[in-house]
Image (cartoon, coloured by chain):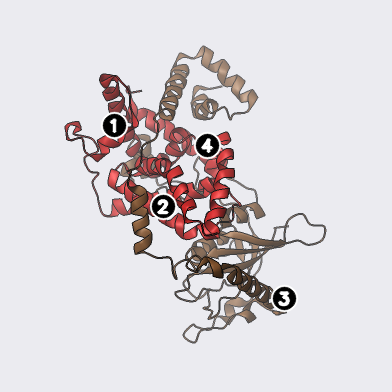
Amino acid sequence: MDKEATKSIRDDGDLVKAFQSGDMIAFDEIVLRYKDRIFSLCYRFTGNFHEAEDCTQDVFLKVYRSLMKFRLESSFYTWLYRITLNTCRSRLKSMKVMNKKKIGYMDNIDNRDEDYQVLENAYEGKNPITELEKIERIRLVQNAIDSLPAWQKEVIILRDIEGLSYEEINRITGYRLGTLKSRLSRARHSLKERLGRII
Amino acid sequence: MECDQVKKLLSEYIDQIIDKPTGILIEKHLKGCGDCNYEYTSLKTMVKELGSMGSFQAPEDLLNKIHEMIEDDPLEGKTGSFSFFPSWSRVPMELLALGLTAVIIFMIFIMIQPESQVMVAPPVKDTTGLVMEKERGLKETRGDMTGSMTRAIKKTGVIQLTLLLGTKPMPVPLPSENLRLIASGKGAEMPLDTPEFEFNAEQDQETGMETSAYQISDIIDAISLYEGRVISKEYKDGIAEPEYIHLEIPAVNYHPFLEKIKDMGKLRTPASDLPEGYQGQAQIRIRVISPE
């Protein structure tokens, strides 16, 4: 992850500078480069296709508004992830307040709603049975993650699913290393209890 | 090592961030304890599985939708940036910004007292009594930003703060009911306003009390966290740590940033407020005093 981040810092920096010089195409390139990763992150947090889509759009709109002032003192993707995390947090809170129910979080596979299609598109295996098993497994794991308290869900997603290092998570969230270790340990044990025999 | 100790450290052991002597002890314990070894294996398998879940594809029309949002909600007046000016005017605007910054820095040097740079708005109560310097100590209660500890200013000059760094707070224990819910795997049922749901990064119930003092790096982290930037630092001769930090923070994050700073110690003078409706960058100059 660090090597990928190092490479992308050089390229991202060029795109940021280009945008700040008036090149609007640079912003489009940034969106195309990060849209899947940001959408994934938003989907992991919200568990809902439409919420994740709205969340992703909000993130990039905030990026567009703030990119002129971005000074590249931290890496671009750290800054982007921080915006995403804050946006997801706000979205989760408003979802709870509005008591929104997730749109059939793939409870009915036959409907093949957008949530199911998100997972289906993630796998392009040739064996339909294996693919179905994988999708079902992912669904169960995502449900378990979704049942975690928000602060546990956050560290599990960033560390174990997104694969960010402790230092990167520290830069994004501001959590100290000791806090992060403790939270991650408890989150992993909580998730393991929920998953039971699935994994 | 006892099984309880080992199980608590398994997460760090899996991530290979544990110190070598402890790692050796854990490895030795796992070889001889079937229960802990099972716990380790299942935890490691779960982490590996999570890492292989892959990413999802964003909707194909996402970029178009973002363009529509940008067109429907132009930037003017919202960011205070130069993005709505045509590119041909950007160079002279940047020169103007540099000139304004120079004027602001010049004003800092000719000011005598922090309070003298502000104008008190007529409806605000006289808070002169609160301006007096208080005794040093960590027992003073913090003022409420919306109450008498702030005075409104009409102009957005550089806000001067003097911060006496304190020691890091003890962790706040969760209510026992919330601990019970977590232990029984029902953490999602915790009330919405529970501190953990508020993502309070300062609360940690297992690492114990941190007795070290806050440092300059904590302030820098806070600036970054609230999407601000450090403009400059000023050093006293022979001192490695800066005495002054000059920074800017988006106005929308000014109050949360101030609360974060006040968590790190004590402000010697009340923090000025921003004009109502101000949406630009708040310029702040913090004088940092480390505890002796």
Judging by the rendered image, the residue that carries numbered circle 1 is: A120
Instruction: Identify the amino acid type marked 4.
Output: Lys
Regarding mark 2 in the picture, which secondary structure is present there? helix
Spot occupied by residue B161 in the image (x, y as percentages of width and height): 62, 68
Q: In the image, which disc is placed on residue A181?
A: 4
Q: How many marks?
A: 4
Circle 3: residue type: Phe
The answer to whether residue B89 shows anywhere in this view is yes
Location of residue B133 in the rendering, given as x and y in whole percent from the top left corner: 65, 73
Q: Which chain is brown?
A: B
- Check contact, mark 2 vs mark 4: CB within 8 A: no
Identify whether B77 is placed above or below A47: below
Between circles 2 and 4, the one closer to the viewer is 2
Q: State which quarter of the image contains the N terminus of chain B.
A: top right
Nearer the observer: mark 3 or 4; the answer is: 3
Q: Secondary structure at mark 4?
A: helix
Tell me, yes or no, whether dots 3 and 4 are on the same chain.
no
Labelled pair 2, 3 in contact (Cβ < 8 Å):
no
Q: CA distance from mark 2 to mark 3?
A: 40 Å
- A141 with respect to B6 (left or right): left
Is there one chain holding both mark 4 and mark 1?
yes
Q: Chain of mark 4?
A: A
Q: Quadrant of residue A144?
A: top left
As measured in the structure, the alpha-carbon distance from the residue carrying label 3 to the one carrying label 4 is: 45 Å
Which amino acid lies under the numbered mark 1 shown in the image of this protein? Glu
